[in-house]
Image (cartoon, rainbow, N blue to C red):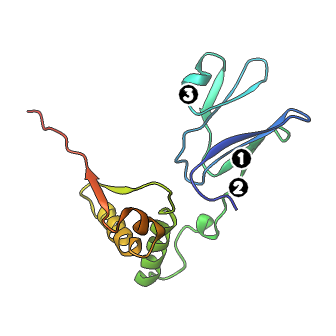
Amino acid sequence: MLDGVFSFVLLDTRDNSFIAARDAIGVTPLYIGWGIDGSVWISSEMKGLNDDCEHFEIFPPGHLYSSKQGGFKRWYNPPWFSEVIPSVPYDPLALRKAFEKAVIKRLMTDVPFGVLLSGGLDSSLVAAVTVRHLAGTKAAKRWGTKLHSFCVGLEVWN
C-alpha cells in the first residue's frame, strides 16, 4: 500500500534487523553496498559507500531489502507488470481520467505551488489540469486561483 516518492530504512532495535525500500519507479536515489566484513550499507549517495564497500549497486526500484532474509523482494507488482503486450484496448477517456487523477493527487500542499514549464506537451497538460482543479480547493481560497508558472531559459553559446 506504499504510494509516493520515497526511500527509507527502518531499524528494529530489538534485534538490530532492518528493512530498506525504494519507491516504485526509483525517483529518490538509493544505493546498497557490501563491506568485506559482510556488513550491509545503504546510502542516498554513492559516495557514502565508495570507501567502505567492496561492492555496491543501485537499489532496485520497487524493491525492499530485508536483513533477516538477506536479499531483495519486489513489493511493487501491479497487474500489468508482467504483460508484454497490453491486453486492454486503448481508451483515451480512461487515459485522460488516469492522468488527471495523477496530477490532482500531487496537488495536496500547505504552501503555495506552481508549475515548471519545459515547453513540451506534458508540462502544458499538467498546468491545464492544475488550473481546472485549483479553483475549488483550499489552496485557491488561501493563495488565489492564479497558477504561477516558471520556465528555465538557457543562453545559447556559439
Residue denoted by label 3: 46
Q: Residue at x 60, y 64 (%)?
A: 81
Q: Is residue 124 above or below residue 39?
A: below
Check residue 64 in the rendering and tell me which mark sits there, or answer none.
1
The amino acid on which the numbered mark 1 sits, given as a three-letter code, is Leu
Q: From the viewer's perspective, tell me whether residue 153 is left or right of residue 114.
A: left
Q: Earlier in the sequence, mark 1 or mark 3?
A: 3
Quarter assignment of residue 128: bottom left
Q: Residue at x 77, y 24 (%)?
A: 39
Front in this rendered view, residue 79 or 116: 116
The amino acid on which the numbered mark 3 sits, given as a three-letter code, is Met
Label 1 to label 2, Cα distance in Å?
Answer: 7 Å
Residue denoted by label 2: 75
Q: Callout 2: helix, strand or loop?
A: loop
Q: Residue at x 65, y 25 (%)?
A: 55
Front in this rendered view, residue 80 or 4: 4
Furthest residue toward left: 158
Front in this rendered view, residue 108 or 127: 108
Q: Position of residue 49 (x, y in %)?
A: 62, 23
The amino acid on which the numbered mark 2 sits, given as a three-letter code, is Trp
Q: From the viewer's perspective, tell me whether residue 98 is left or right of residue 61.
A: left
Q: Position of residue 129 (x, y in %)?
A: 37, 71
Q: Is residue 87 above or below residue 146?
A: below
